[in-house]
């Protein structure tokens, strides 16, 4: 099957407390975003990689690519007003003959090859796939009168890549934007298509804070 991955990297890194966006910070000598692109290239060096970046960050990214001699091929798309609009811009850059499109957070460099494989394989059967991991801590639901414990076995933590039949995803992203769209699965579900879950990998963390960077140094 012909595959593509849209990698969205629009963060400003405010929770990192520095001036450099989190996707450009190095983990043991290589920026986070480069590690992410490299992981999908390692999975399938024939798949189309679409990188979505804010226009204001694109010159700096090009400088980094030259500095690190980074040569993984990709197609560049401009970031949008929201994540929804950024993903839509990325989808618009995907080749017409692609059968399955994945969407991945640029700051998740530790997704495993097994997780990526499971997502694309299941997408070929069900058309819409999300990787998840179990909730290992106690969860409480906030209510007007306080909070109550809920059974964690009924919940899962959602990761990326979220992978879809290409035509399904293109049609779903023609819907008007609403605040309900927190990820790509929510867009596809609102369009009327069910989403299948597959097992993700615990190391597939989303790097957003200095603490996450410390964890990333260990995971590398």
Image (tube, rainbow, N blue to C red):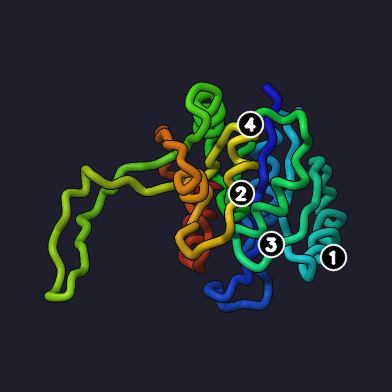
Image position of 165 with respect to 207: above or below: above
Is mark 2 in CB contact (under 8 Å) with mark 4?
no
Q: Quadrant of residue 143?
A: bottom left
**Mark 1 secondary-structure assignment:** helix
Mark 1 and mark 4 lie on one chain; the one further toward the N terminus is 1
Mark 2 and mark 3 lie on one chain; the one further toward the N terminus is 3
Instruction: Point out residue 19 in the picture as x, y percentages from the top left corner.
Output: 67, 77
**Mark 2 secondary-structure assignment:** loop
The residue lying at 63 percent from left, 71 percent from top is 12
Query: Marks 1 and 2, Cα distance to the nearest angstrom?
Result: 28 Å
The residue tagged 2 is 173
**Mark 4 secondary-structure assignment:** strand
Residue toward you, 88 or 199: 88
Instruction: Report the mark closest to the observer, 1 or 2.
Output: 2
Query: Marks 2 and 3, Cα distance to the nearest angstrom?
Result: 28 Å
Residue 28 in sight:
no
The residue tagged 3 is 24
Mark 1 and mark 2 lie on one chain; the one further toward the N terminus is 1
């Amino acid at each position: 099957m012909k595959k593509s991955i849209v990698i969205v990297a629009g963060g400003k890194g405010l929770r990192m407390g520095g001036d450099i966006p989190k996707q450009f910070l190095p983990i043991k000598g290589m920026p986070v975003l480069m590690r992410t692109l490299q992981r999908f290239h390692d999975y399938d060096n024939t798949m189309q990689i679409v990188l979505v970046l804010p226009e204001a960050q694109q010159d700096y990214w090009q400088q980094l690519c030259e500095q690190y001699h980074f040569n993984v091929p990709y197609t560049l798309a401009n970031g949008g007003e929201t994540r929804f609009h950024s993903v839509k811009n990325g989808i618009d850059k995907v080749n017409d003959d692609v059968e399955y499109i994945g969407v991945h957070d640029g700051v998740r460099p530790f997704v495993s090859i097994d997780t990526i494989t499971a997502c694309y394989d299941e997408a070929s059967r069900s058309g819409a796939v999300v990787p998840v991991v179990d909730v290992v801590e106690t969860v409480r639901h906030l209510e007007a009168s306080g909070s109550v414990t809920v059974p964690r076995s009924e919940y899962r933590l959602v990761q990326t890549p979220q992978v879809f039949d290409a035509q399904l995803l293109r049609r779903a992203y023609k819907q008007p934007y609403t605040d309900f769209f927190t990820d790509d699965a929510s867009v596809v579900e609102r369009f009327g298509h069910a989403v299948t879950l597959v097992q993700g990998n615990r190391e597939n963390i989303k790097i957003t804070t200095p603490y996450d960077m410390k964890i990333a140094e260990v995971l590398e």
